[in-house]
Amino acid sequence: MSKDLANLEVLSTRAGFNAAVRQIQKTISISGDAGSDNLADILYEMGDNELSGERIGLLLRMILVDKLGYKAASSNLATVVDDPAKLAKEFAKWKGADLIAAYHHPELGLLIANPKVAEELSGFGGLRKRELLVVYAGKQGKSADENCQHAAELALSLFAGAKVKIPPALLKGNFSARKVSAPAGDDGKTAVSRKAVKKKAAKTAPKAKRDPSAPHAERIAAPVVTASVTARGSVKMTPRYAVVVQNELFHNGNVEAWKRIVASYNSKHPTLEVYIYYEGERILDINSLFKWGKVKHGSAIEFAVAGDNIQDVAKLQRYLSQGASSQFEAFLHGPVNNVLRLF
């Protein structure tokens, strides 16, 4: 099969054809607006879940590079950036160029933001070491120049923690940050701000009850999650929560308990995904925690949950804490292939 035919194969089914038509229609609509507004601002306010991952990448290429001629600079980050939103105040001074940052999040996929807007940058969470960050700089409907290339490179350096000297030409212009509106909610109404959601949830959320059979947890995860609204739609991911190993060693029994706990959670919440981390690295196979043989008493294994309508995080942490202790056997009863009803 030729390369051209392979690219058109998606059109051979009704679902694929309709998806392609929707993508084309959205691209045409967005393309017209991008000539007079920041592309990341446009997508942020749309809050469209379908515009994510590779589709966002297509928009960046088609609109920013091919149509508007934006310059770009990219790098795999050499350092961790805990709070990139703090940089928005500095970027907001750069009125000589329009900026867009694209971050390849290891779990959530490709995210984009206007770096001049703190609300959008906060959607990146923390920028992790060795992950790809690309900065685009241009002048929307006008031709980009060498100052735009310099702006992209300087912005990338600023993200990396370097001290940069901003040329006067980059501080003068019409590309000021504007106040963005919260994206539309699922019901079509404008979503409330994240601060309002957290404030309300803190008042109304019931306190998590401690399982008497579980050991004391280092930190109980509140049922309130951090909602990051980015250009790929409404993306929610909790912070990472630590589970301290109570056993002398996180052995095979603990591993099996964790596998059954996570399977039970996934059975109850099939649209949610549990991410597990150890020493800052994501664990794709829970068995590897036992095989390494170095997860000992007092070590912290972290987890996070991603998806929409996140629930039962506190209960999940209590069960994982029990599964990391000498009480792990409570999760091993019953047939091996049966899913426990824990949630």
Image: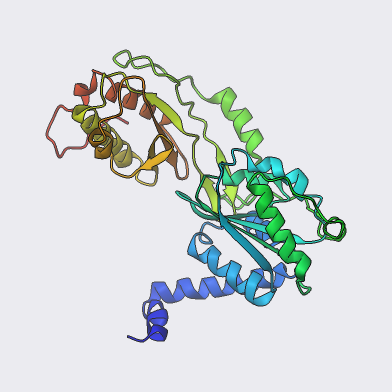
Q: Quadrant of residue 10?
A: bottom left
In the depicted structure, whether residue 153 falls above or below residue 62: above
Q: Looking at the rendering, in which quadrant would you find the C terminus?
A: top left
Taking the image as shown, residue 137 lies to the left or right of residue 343, namely right
How many circles with numbers are drawn on the protein? Answer: 0
Residue 322 seen:
yes
Q: Quadrant of residue 84?
A: top right
Nearer to the camera, 57 or 191: 57
Q: Quadrant of residue 287?
A: top left
Residue at 63% across / 28% down in the picture?
199
Q: Residue furthest left?
A: 335
Nearer to the camera, 177 or 247: 247
Residue at 33% across / 22% down in the picture?
245
Taking the image as shown, residue 7 lies to the left or right of residue 23, namely left
Residue 120 seen:
no
In the depicted structure, whether residue 150 falls above or below residue 207: below
In the depicted structure, whether residue 119 falls above or below residue 320: below
Nearer to the camera, 208 or 251: 251
Residue at 81% across / 50% down in the picture?
93
Q: Position of residue 323 (x, y in %)?
A: 27, 25
- The chosen color scheme is rainbow
Q: Looking at the rendering, in which quadrant would you find the N terminus?
A: bottom left
Nearer to the camera, 272 or 15: 272
Residue at 54% across / 61% down in the picture?
51
Q: Position of residue 153 (x, y in %)?
A: 68, 59
Taking the image as shown, residue 127 lies to the left or right of residue 315, namely right
Q: Position of residue 307 (x, y in %)?
A: 45, 45
